[in-house]
Image: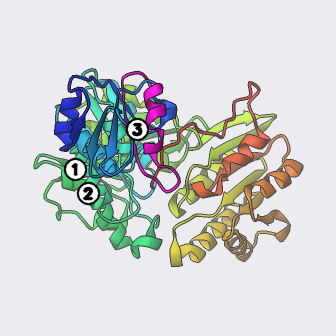
Amino acid sequence: MTATEIAGAIGGTLLADADIVVTGISTDTRTIVPGCLFVAIRGPRFDGHLFAVDALEGGAVLILADEGAELPVGVPCIRCADTVKALGTLAAWHRSRFSMPVVAVTGSVGKTSTREMIAAALSSRYNVLKTKGNYNNEIGLPLSVLQLDDCHTAAVFELGMSGLGEISHLSRIVRPDIAVITNIGLSHIEKLGSRQNILRAKLEIIEGMGPEGVVILNGEDELLKGLRGLLRFKTLYYGMDEATDIQGYEAASLGENGMAFKTSIAGQDGSFTIRAPGMHSVSNALAALAVCHSLGLRQIEAEEGLQRYAGEQMRMNIFDRRGIKIINDAYNAAPASMKAALAVLAELGSGRRTVAVLGDMLELGDWSRDAHLDVGRQAAALKLGLLFAVGPDAKWYISGALEMGMKRERVQAYGTADEAAAALADCLEPGDVVLFKASRGLHLERIVDRLFPEENGAMPGTSSETAGRLT
């Protein structure tokens, strides 16, 4: 883009050479490359305007700045009322320059895994741009959209939120042809007050769609099922239920190698395997197959694409270290995903000692106590070997497990990840299978980093992504 194009797209005031050409974009001076537009954002801890000179020294050729912000004299810039809003406006303008299938994914849990499976499934036919890491909010999503270029033939974007109106804004930026909602759970119920309000917030994903758009919904979710026949768009349901349009059946575990399952789609039967354990992974794959069906991919193409799926760090990442099998799923947690992870632990740990290291599930409000109790009950029902609970609400995991008959000597509660790490170091033994699962704020990956560093010094639990992520 030229400086003139950028200023015109956002309605900004250009105070620089009109012919400056921008070949990249960044909101962080640590990621600046030559030719960048640096977007200066005021955050709760940092003001990007203070780093404008650093950005220029790092190779940026233009600064996007708020109208009232102070910058050194002569800094090439575009002034606007609000750089965050301008970033979204610029991304929406950039999106309008491309004609290709665009898929948007949201939901309470499973968004990222579903996004990855959709991108993998489509990769057999398309060159797919997908949301980078955790870039799914009002800053991260526009940065992902602005990565679109002429080499891409399809895109899959993840839309996150923390309140009403946010997904609507993101949907209008990406203008999806296909919208996928994975489920309606309890994440953010503390702020939104009810699952019905969460449903309203997630349904905002359709607000940027054109009249020919397709909505793909989880047919096993009670609230999403209630939308049948009510949306103005063509709607497809996926799930293990016979009433769904993309139906899975006869799912079988392959252990840590994944799942095998059969499908019935538009009267055609199929068989698939995915390299991801757990029934929840089959659900994610069915969502991907629904997208493939909507875009007319043949079964052999979808099967070839799904074979390329690989999970992300801290999302059901399974590895062995010193005779101990680790399931690192510490990126985030909600009641549904917590139960799914416990089921995988019990399955992969059959015949071995299983250890669940569970941190608090955040943003549940008045539902928090009951949700943690319920997860503790499941840990006991699955006959897990040990339960380590971490965080202020950890006591409810313990209470639920004891209520279901788990022996007291098999449960422990800790206030912080560091305290739990010290205790685990003393008790873990070769042959154990250990799950780490919590909301991101508990930082359980620190335990993985501390106890199971890779031989080359890289840490299996850490992630290099720094952009804020909203679930």
Q: Does residue 435 appear to the left or right of 280 in the view shown?
A: right
Q: CA distance from mark 1 to mark 2?
A: 6 Å
Q: Amino acid at mark 2?
A: Ser
Q: Residue at x 15, y 54 (%)?
A: 233
Q: Does residue 139 appear to the left or right of 331 in the view shown?
A: left
Label 1, residues with CA under 10 Å away: few <14, some 14-19, many ≥20: some
Q: Residue at x 18, y 44 (%)?
A: 11
Residue 411, position as x, y percentages in the image = 79, 65
- Pointer 2: what residue? 168
**Secondary structure type for disc 3:** loop
Precedes in sequence: disc 1 or disc 3: 3
Label 3, residues with CA under 10 Å away: few <14, some 14-19, many ≥20: few
Q: Pointers 1 and 2 in contact (CB under 8 A)? A: yes
Relative depth, front residue between 196 and 15: 15
Quarter of the image where the C terminus is located: bottom left
Q: Amino acid at mark 1?
A: Arg
- Pointer 3: what residue? 72
Residue 149 showing in the rendered view: yes
- Pointer 1: what residue? 172
Q: CA distance from mark 2 to mark 3?
A: 37 Å
In front of the other: label 1 or label 3? 3
In front of the other: label 2 or label 3? 3
Residue 429, position as x, y percentages in the image = 86, 44
Residue 181, image quadrant: bottom left
Q: Magenta residues? A: 33-58
